[in-house]
Image (cartoon, rainbow, N blue to C red):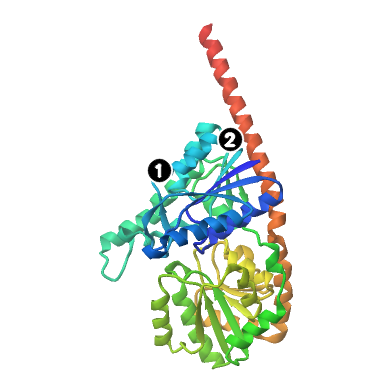
Amino acid sequence: MKIAMLTNNYRPFVGGVPISVERQAQELVKLGHQVTVFAPMYESEDKEQAESFREKILEEDKKAPERVVRYRSQKRKMDNGMVYPGIYPTEIFEMFERERFDRIHVHHPMFVGPWALWLGKKYGIPVIYTYHTRYEDYLHYIPCFRLNEKSTIVKRKAVEWIQKNVIPSYMRWFCNRCDLVFAPSAGMQQVIREYGVDTPAAVFPTGLDGAFFRKDVRRSQEIRKQYSRGKRHMLVTVSRLEKEKNYGFLLRGIAELRQELGDEFHVLIIGEGSQKSELKVRASILGIQDVVTFMGNIPNDQVKDYLGAADVFLFASKSETQGIVLEEALAAGIPVVAVHATGTDDIIEDGVNGFLTEEREEVWAAKVIEALVEEKNCGMKSAALGSAEKYRASRLAIYEEMLYNQCGFRKGERLYEAEEDRRECSAMALH
């Protein structure tokens, strides 16, 4: 099959969706399919480095197994570094005029989303959509919807109404115009059904590359020696440093943990984001600045070594549709302590490969301490490795291929039935 994947963000931007798109594309290529990823171009803010920055991106694209076609993006960016795609992506349209694609897989309902629907209708191509993001939790990226202590009651009510009514209505409209919807977890499949989506849907999580299952014990030991500061336990968390990741709770939980464990542990926080400076200040206010290290971004192929160096993975986000980092933690063989949430609950088995808690710092901290008990920790590590097996990308790609084929058959049947109905109507009109 010739598959067109349309996305609003891709490498070098670091995030769950770009990782998911890249892994799916590359695994499908391994199965013999031709995959073209249509992604925005990223520009350097330093004008002197603009040309070299662009050339570096294009050079990396050439080396990738999937074909990448870059379309123009707007100059302004969101606070987290994500670009705004161009309003009219001519690069995509021109490619569709030159080539015939068998499937369109779109990864966002806005910007490239409506264009994917239009292209699918124009060329008679099945459109598949992956419901990666709960957009009602991301309104704060749009300045006019951002709330603070000065926001009026009217504005708060308006934002709440948009979250509870406008976004679900739009998502229902968009999904019902696709031919197939992928839900990253069973919990998200239930959410989209509650929104009123009646398009065929399948649970399809993001897979893990085989490299995540190959441990570099020596490198992990080096990392632990370098960053644990000689403490008995090392803990780690990985995500963008943004509001929706619930880092306020996580830092308060770490402060609670310190009250119980004293100075017996150190936490690595891996990731970048617009809240980094604020979170460092919060850590100082809570008195935990000496037990946490903000690592910044780590190359994705090295994250597993940092995970493998830790005893427990910490997580507090409630906005995940799946949580790829949770899979990665399990593949590294470390238990997870997380807050109950859609997506997270589908990956973590409470008491087996980790713990799920209510959003109360003392309860969460108590479960972290329990997960650090040697006997419990060893059992959960073994269970974590077993849980991760079902997320191997190579296995999931075969399942995705089957879903693509089924979607094509259903589309063909609907087109055939519509044509038959048209002929019957024409025949009746003649009589």
Does residue 184 show up? no
Residue 33: x and y in percent read 67, 45
Secondary structure beneath label 1: loop
Residue shown at the point (54%, 42%) measured from the top left:
198
Q: Quadrant of residue 300?
A: bottom right
Q: Element at badge 2?
A: loop
The residue tagged 2 is: 100
Q: Is residue 327 left or right of residue 87?
A: right
Nearer to us in this view, 202 or 82: 82
Q: Is residue 430 left or right of residue 75?
A: right
Of the image marks 2 and 1, the number of the one nearer the N terminus: 1
Q: Residue furthest top?
A: 431
Residue depicted at 42% across the width and 49% down the height:
72
Which amino acid type corresponds to the residue marked 2 in the rendered image? Answer: Arg
Residue 25: x and y, percent?
62, 52
Q: Position of residue 237 (x, y in %)?
A: 55, 75
* Quarter of the figure that contains the N terminus: top right
- Report the amino acid beneath label 1: Tyr
On the image, numbered disc 1 is attached to which residue? 88
Residue at position x 51%, y 44% from top? 175
Q: Residues within 10 Å of mark 1 (few under 14, many from 20)?
A: some
Category of crowding for the residue at label 2, using alpha-carbon neighbours closer than 10 angstroms: few (below 14), some (14–19), many (at least 20): few
Q: Is residue 245 something that shows in the picture? A: yes
Per the model, the C-alpha gap separating discs 2 and 1 is 20 Å
Q: Residue 101 placed where, x, y %?
A: 59, 38
Establish if 6 lies above or below 125: below
Is 314 situated above or below 107?
below
